[in-house]
Structure formats: structure tokens, C-alpha cells
Image (spheres, rainbow, N blue to C red):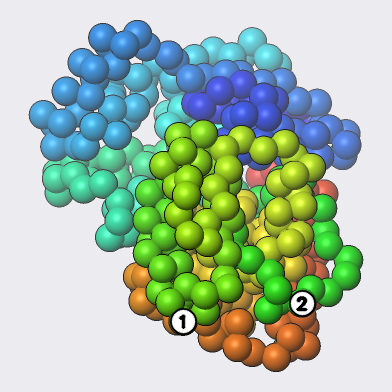
Amino acid sequence: MKILVSSVIGEPRNPRTWSNAPAHLIAELEQLGVIVATIDNCQKVGRLAKLGLMGVSMLSGHNRHNYARNALLLRRRQEAAAAAFHRSGADLLLCTGSMDAPVGQGVPYALWIDDTWHLLHANPHAPRCSESSFQKIDRLERAAFQDAKCLLAFSEHVAADAIGHYGVQAQRVHVVGCGSGSISPLEEDKTYADGYLLFVAKHLFHLKGGAVTLAAFEKVRAARPQTRLVVVGTDETARRLAGRDGIDARGFVERTELNNLFHGAAMLVQPMLIDPWGQVYLEAMKAKALVVSWNNAAIPELTDNGRLGGIVATATPDLIAAKVLELYNRQNDELAAIAREAQRRVLDRFAWPAVGRRVHDAILKAL
């Protein structure tokens, strides 16, 4: 079997593309004997053209972030994906998202998706757009989903939306998951009272929950002055937070140092506002750091409806701080047992070999 993997973000084998997820998946599929070709379907435009597309997007009722869904760019991506597929001699095109799905062009394709437009629009923290804009993009996504050989959803709630809102036949929808980065599993148990809080955001500090986490930390420190917060982000973030009591803010760190920071953390406090999946949650669970976030997107699935983490109803500083303090006050043996089970859940369900096997089997079934 040969497949062509496409990404609108960059070259699928590049570790920087989509948090390295396509590269990891390709490696697993190749281990299973699949021949994989790739296409970088980013369709880059110049600065002036980008500003023009943003303006057109806003005039059309979209927000400026949705310029990538411009009809011209969509058509260019679709045509490029179809042409590359025919050149490749592949049996199937695997699109990492729906924005270059060659709808109606006779190309057999599958979509690996972490979210839907409908779910994103329902999130109160997502950028707003007009109702007409929402409906237009929703129709485009519906067509992409309906024409696909199969949908490969990261999580159960995305699969349910594809079936319930977009009307995709249940037998064509598969929950395959997504793996994580290279944080190693921690073998020994932790002493949670001695551990610090961790927040990680290489970009999009606010949308990753940075402001909520900082405000919550102030409340935690008022009740528990010995608590520390380690923030891993950008050099600019590190400069902005330098000198704040109890905060150790760092810019870029090497993989070994990042691994050690996860291993030393009692909790990952990361109430991401619009992230549909969150590889960082999986990394924390592998490192036996308790996940503190809000009840949104894939978090219920990853934490067994909050049983294996500290989950609150909404992303507010008061609720996040209260949950952190509650966890610090629980018995260490209880927290260690939760962390061990959370780690097993990640290693069993979301290790890359398991994800690769599920994708492989779903594609074979579709073909």
C-alpha cells in the first residue's frame, strides 16, 4: 500500500510541522510496510497578499485568522493535492486536516483531524465570526467530510461531532488518537508536596492558558507561599516574567532539560483555551505530573472524565487555584496511584505505535 500525506502547515516529515505529529505517524506507518510520499501544501503567499487576504476575510464576515480559508487558497491547495496524488501513484491521500481535501475530484482521501469547525465555533474563547461566515465554512467542511473515504479523529468528541453534526456515516469514522513528544515515562513515584507547578507554551501564550495560570498562581501563593511555578516559553515571556515572586520563567530549553522539568513537576497547570487535543497533557501524564485544566475538548477523554487529573468546569483563576490547592492537600499515596494509572492510560492508548496501527487498519478498511 502506498499513501500520500499532505499538510497545509509544512512538510509532513519536518519535526516543526503540527508538533511533529505527521512525522511520527509516517514513521509508524513505514514500520508497518506502508510506502509514504509527502506534499508540503502550505501555498505560501507574500506579506502584501497575506494582508489583502486578511482584509477580504474580515469584509466577508470572517475574522482575520481565517484568511487561510479564502476560496482562492482552498482551490489552490485542493488542486495541488489532487495533482500530487496523481503523480505519486498512491492508493490514498491522507490529509492532515480538511483545508486541502480534493472534494469532488475523484481522489480517494482520508482526513486526520483534531477538531471540527463546528466545535471550534462553539468554544467561547475562539475568535468570533459572523453567522453567514460560520455557515459558509461549515458547508465547506461538511463537503470535505462527506466526500472522504474515512475520517480519522484524534478523539471521541470529534468523532461524535463528525457523525452528529456533519452526518458522516459512523462506519467511516474512526477514533485513532495522536501520540505525544519525546518526554520519557517516569518510573519512580513522586513526592507531590515538594513538586512545583509547570506551564509550557512555545507560542500563543494567552490561548495556551498563560494569563489564567498566572492569575491562579497568585491565589495559590497567597494560601501556600512555598509553591513555585516554572514557565517554559519564549525568551520574550521569560523577560516579561523575570523577577516575579515564585516564578522561574525560561525561554527555549533543550530536550533533556525539558524532560527533567516535567519529571520534577507536581502538576502541569495548563488551562488551554482553544486547543482541541493537547500533546502537552500526554507528556505530563507520562511524567506523572497531574494535569490541571478545564473540562473542554479532549481533556475528559484523556483524564477519564477528570478522575485522573484536576479538572474544573470553566477556565477561571479561582477554580484553577482551588483545584491546585485541593490536590496539594491530598495524601501522596493517593496522588501517586492516580499518576500511575494516568501514565498507563497514555502509554497503552496514545503511544505512537498504537496510533499508527489504528490509522493503518482504518485506511485498509476504507480501501
Residue 327 on image: x %, y %: 59, 82
Horizontal arrangement in the rendering, residue 302 relative to residue 209 (left or right): right
Residue 161 on image: x %, y %: 43, 60
Residue at image x 36%, y 24%?
Answer: 74
Seen in the picture, residue 268 relative to 182 is either above or below; the reply is below
Looking at the rendered structure, the kind of residue marked 1 is: Ala
Name the image quarter holding the N terminus.
Answer: top right
Name the image quarter holding the C terminus.
Answer: top right
Residue at image x 49%, y 68%?
Answer: 293
Q: How crowded is mark 2: few (under 14 residues within 10 Å), some or many (20 or more)?
A: some
Foreground pick, 87 / 61: 61
Which image quadrant is residue 93 in? top right
- Mark carried by residue 191: 2
- Which residue is most to the left? 59
Q: Residues within 10 Å of mark 1 (few under 14, many from 20)?
A: few
Residue 241 on image: x %, y %: 45, 47
- Mark carried by residue 90: none
Foreground pick, 282 / 263: 263
**Residue 10 in sight from this viewpoint:** yes
Seen in the picture, residue 280 relative to 37 is either above or below; the reply is below
Residue at image x 32%, y 30%?
Answer: 69
Q: What element carries label 2?
A: loop
Disc nearest the viewer among 2 and 1:
1
Foreground pick, 253 / 36: 253
Disc on the earlier residue, 2 or 1: 2
Q: What element carries label 1?
A: helix
Query: Residue at label 1?
Result: 223
Looking at the rendered structure, the kind of residue marked 2 is: Thr
Residue 104 on image: x %, y %: 42, 29
Horizontal arrangement in the rendering, residue 7 relative to residue 257 (left or right): left
